[in-house]
Image (cartoon, helix red, strand yellow):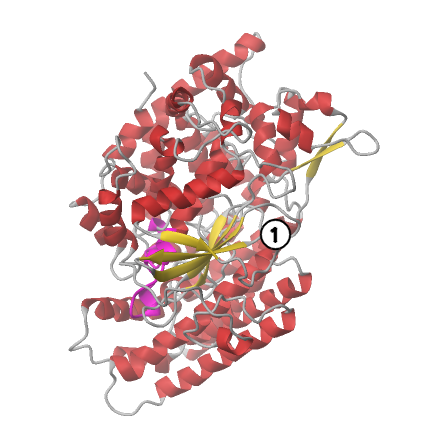
């Protein structure tokens, strides 16, 4: 998944239908939604060719600086000071823009406006990251305050009639197409934000948005700080789990073993643990994270968003949210969910029958399956019917090799190289900094914060840090994940799901880096419609299903032997059945979540009971029985960040499958199509509508055919 930068650069995400409270870290979860949220469970040019010089805090906080963003910020006080200076500069730029006499030109009006967005982007994105990852609670608290300040100032900007009038008066007679599109989109988003409302209404809008920032932060904080666990009596209870997993989980003084509900413990338990009671307890613990505290917080979030939508002239939040998306309306989003449900009906039915038949071999007379069976029986089927044991993959996927594989494969595909910056200022000793180069020139910078620790964002996401502007500053981003490894002596043996997660998130990062080289910050970076942003990352997942690609980096952590080709082929056959879940059931679970995301926001809050809605949607779309006493919505971070838009994942997947149809499946490492894809889809950023990006690459509008073929594909 990709987080939305707090003040994201364009009013399209700043306030209106995307994330009106303009926050960064709301989009919590794992990128591949099936694994993460389905209970269990989400033209590149450059600057100087050498590493960025170390500069002081003043340089790091100035607009257009190329120093690593954390330069000069070792403390909460210095971080707050430099960002307060940025916010003060925003006010100065607004005053300068609105005071311009005479003819309005891109140079005297659009340039200062874009500089405003550059400053807001930096504060919002960096504060949003720090409140989710910094080990010091004082810095996290400071970052939350800065998030609130930046969002409030962003809201103030979006409701500033003088700024809107100045942009409306721009003379664009000699402007290029990108500039024209930029201004057109910004004016639309000002109107969506409520700039054309009367003063009293604008004041109410601002107050609600300010409240929503704090409510969203509370929702995320409760998820992030939850340390739920499951305790087992002894190692016997871990039967079926990998040896290295058991070795990492030593009994305490009383002989008990504590298992976290974070991903490195969650997924192995749900996939391999033979003891049904352990899987059940893990499921229930995971599905009650941030409960009960987030029940009231979520209700408040829903009610405030509904009031805001009404103030802006929309019947409900879902209608408001979808107004500037590819899908076009909440009715169209609902129709799309129905289309996916219908398309997956037969596949889901047969998948269920296969699972139930397998369970009956061990549990004669079984009449159904439980949700904690969801990953366990499919794993046995892959092992027995497809001759594939996922545990055999793990020794070939130590974290360091997976990381190098991500770097090597994407370097070869897209024609860039990466250099680690050993002395870069970072927020935690475990964080690594890299810079991206093309043709000897530096074109971007990114950070890898990849292993769990207390009080850190607990899912997987890419966070924007700084949007690049050609000739002024290079793009910066961070991957925040929770993958195995990170402790001395631990090789961090990854599941295939972990590997695909890494590649998915790196897809977002590449989008950020390649699109960060435009003239205007407001169209740079990942500025497409929100329901397209997952498509490039979902497409990149395909490379991890290819034997030739895996064999470039997957080597046994002890012997160094490359992964056997036959094991990868077995994995591919098994994946036609499904990765963690059989395909049809996975799709149905996603529609439960997409339906929930839409349903809590497409009606009056008085009609919303989130527990009842989950039960109703589960019974409608998903054959696994609902588990009373669980409250998955309390830790479903998308309900804040993506709000009504969880349909995005499947919408993007339909597009991703069509994009992938253009690549040579027999040689996925051939850079020819990858470079064309990079130039047509990634590098344009937000300079053209997403549908046009896709059409430019495909030579036609996207279709449902490739997705349908994938859904119905079965192993031979």
For label 1, the crowd category at 10 Å Cα-Cα, with few meaning under 14, some 14 to 19 and many 20 or more, is many
- Magenta span contains residue 368: no
Judging depth in this view, the residue of 365 and 476 nearest the camera is 476
Please indicate whether residue 687 sits to the left or right of residue 93 in the image: left
Q: In which quarter of the image is residue 345?
A: top left
Q: Where is residue 120 in the image (x, y as percent from the top left)?
A: 45, 71
Q: Position of residue 261 (x, y in %)?
A: 63, 38
Please indicate whether residue 661 sits to the left or right of residue 608 in the image: left
Judging depth in this view, the residue of 209 and 29 nearest the camera is 29
Q: Position of residue 248 (x, y in %)?
A: 68, 33
Per the image, the residue denoted by label 1 is 456
Looking at the rendered structure, the number of numbered marks drawn on it comes to 1
Q: In which quarter of the image is the C terminus?
A: top left
Judge whether 558 appears above or below 566 on screen.
below
Please indicate whether residue 528 sits to the left or right of residue 502 in the image: left
> In this rendering, does residue 593 appear at all?
no
Judge whether 525 appears above or below 65 on screen.
above
Q: What stretch is highlighted in magenta?
A: 510-532
Q: Quadrant of residue 562?
A: top left
Q: Where is residue 648 in the image (x, y as percent from the top left)?
A: 38, 46
Identify the residue at the far right of this view. 254
Q: Which residue is drawn at 27% across and 51% down?
A: 678
Judge whether 406 appears above or below 628 on screen.
below
- Magenta span contains residue 525: yes
Judge whether 705 appears above or below 133 on screen.
above
Q: Which residue is drawn at 42% across and 43% down?
A: 406
Dot 1 falls on a residue whose secondary structure is: loop
> In this rendering, does residue 63 appear at all?
yes
């Amino acid at each position: 998944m990709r987080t939305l930068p707090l003040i994201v650069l364009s009013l399209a995400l700043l306030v209106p239908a995307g994330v009106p409270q303009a926050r960064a870290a709301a989009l919590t979860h794992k990128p591949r939604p099936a694994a993460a949220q389905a209970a269990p469970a989400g033209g590149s040019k450059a600057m100087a060719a050498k590493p960025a010089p170390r500069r002081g805090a003043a340089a790091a906080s100035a607009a257009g600086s190329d120093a690593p963003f954390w330069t000069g910020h070792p403390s909460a006080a210095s971080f707050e000071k430099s960002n307060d200076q940025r916010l003060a500069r925003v006010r100065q730029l607004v005053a300068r823009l609105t005071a311009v006499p005479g003819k309005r030109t891109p140079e005297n009006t659009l340039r200062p406006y874009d500089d405003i967005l550059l400053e807001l982007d930096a504060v919002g994105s960096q504060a949003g990251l720090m409140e989710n990852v910094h080990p010091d609670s004082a810095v996290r608290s400071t970052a939350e305050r800065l998030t609130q300040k930046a969002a409030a100032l962003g809201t103030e900007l979006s409701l500033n009639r003088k700024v809107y009038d100045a942009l409306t008066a721009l003379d664009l007679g000699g402007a290029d197409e990108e500039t024209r599109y930029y201004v057109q989109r910004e004016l639309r988003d000002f109107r969506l934000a409520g700039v054309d409302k009367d003063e009293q209404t604008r004041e109410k809008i601002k107050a609600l948005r300010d409240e929503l920032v704090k409510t969203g932060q509370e929702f995320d904080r409760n998820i992030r700080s939850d340390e739920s666990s499951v305790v087992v009596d002894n190692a016997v209870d871990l039967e079926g789990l990998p040896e290295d997993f058991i070795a990492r989980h030593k009994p305490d003084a009383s002989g008990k073993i504590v298992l976290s509900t974070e991903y490195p413990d969650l997924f192995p338990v749900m996939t391999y643990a033979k003891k049904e009671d352990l899987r059940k307890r893990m499921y229930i613990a995971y599905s009650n994270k941030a409960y009960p505290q987030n029940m009231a917080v979520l209700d408040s979030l829903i009610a405030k968003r509904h009031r805001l939508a009404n103030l802006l002239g929309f019947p409900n939040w879902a209608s408001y949210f979808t107004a500037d998306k590819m899908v076009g309306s909440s009715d169209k989003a609902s129709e799309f969910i129905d289309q996916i449900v219908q398309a997956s009906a037969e596949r889901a039915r047969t998948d269920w029958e296969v699972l139930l038949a397998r369970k009956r071999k061990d549990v004669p007379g079984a009449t159904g399956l439980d949700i904690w069976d969801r990953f366990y029986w499919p794993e046995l089927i892959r092992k027995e019917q497809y001759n594939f044991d996922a545990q055999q993959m793990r020794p070939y996927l130590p974290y360091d090799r997976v990381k190098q594989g991500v770097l090597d494969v994407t370097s070869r595909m897209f024609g860039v190289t990466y250099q680690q910056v050993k002395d870069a200022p970072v927020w935690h000793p475990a964080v690594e900094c890299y810079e991206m180069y093309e043709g000897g020139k530096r074109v971007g910078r990114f950070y890898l914060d990849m292993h769990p620790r207390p009080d850190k964002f607990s899912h997987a996401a890419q966070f924007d840090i700084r949007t690049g502007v050609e000739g002024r500053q290079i793009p910066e981003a961070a991957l925040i994940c929770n993958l195995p490894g990170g402790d001395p002596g631990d090789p961090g043996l990854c599941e295939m799901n972990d590997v695909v997660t890494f590649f998915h998130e790196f897809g977002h990062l590449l989008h950020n880096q390649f699109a960060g080289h435009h003239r205007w910050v407001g169209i740079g970076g990942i500025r497409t419609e929100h329901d397209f942003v997952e498509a490039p990352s979902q497409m990149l997942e395909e490379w991890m299903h290819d034997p030739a690609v895996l064999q470039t980096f997957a080597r046994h952590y002890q012997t160094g032997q490359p992964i056997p080709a036959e094991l990868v082929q077995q994995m591919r056959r098994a994946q036609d059945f499904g990765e963690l879940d059989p395909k049809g059931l996975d799709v149905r679970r996603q529609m439960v979540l997409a339906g929930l995301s839409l349903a809590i926001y497409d009606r009056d809050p008085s009609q919303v009971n989130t527990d009842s809605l989950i039960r109703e949607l589960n019974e409608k779309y998903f054959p696994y029985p609902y588990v009373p006493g669980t409250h998955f919505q309390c830790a479903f971070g998308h309900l804040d960040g993506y709000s009504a838009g969880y349909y995005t994942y499947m919408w993007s997947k339909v597009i991703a499958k069509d994009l992938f149809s253009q690549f040579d499946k027999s040689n996925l490492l051939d850079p020819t199509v990858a470079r064309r894809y990079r130039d047509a889809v990634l590098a344009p950023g937000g300079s053209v509508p997403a549908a046009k990006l896709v059409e430019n690459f495909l030579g036609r509008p996207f279709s449902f055919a490739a997705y349908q073929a994938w859904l119905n594909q079965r192993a031979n």
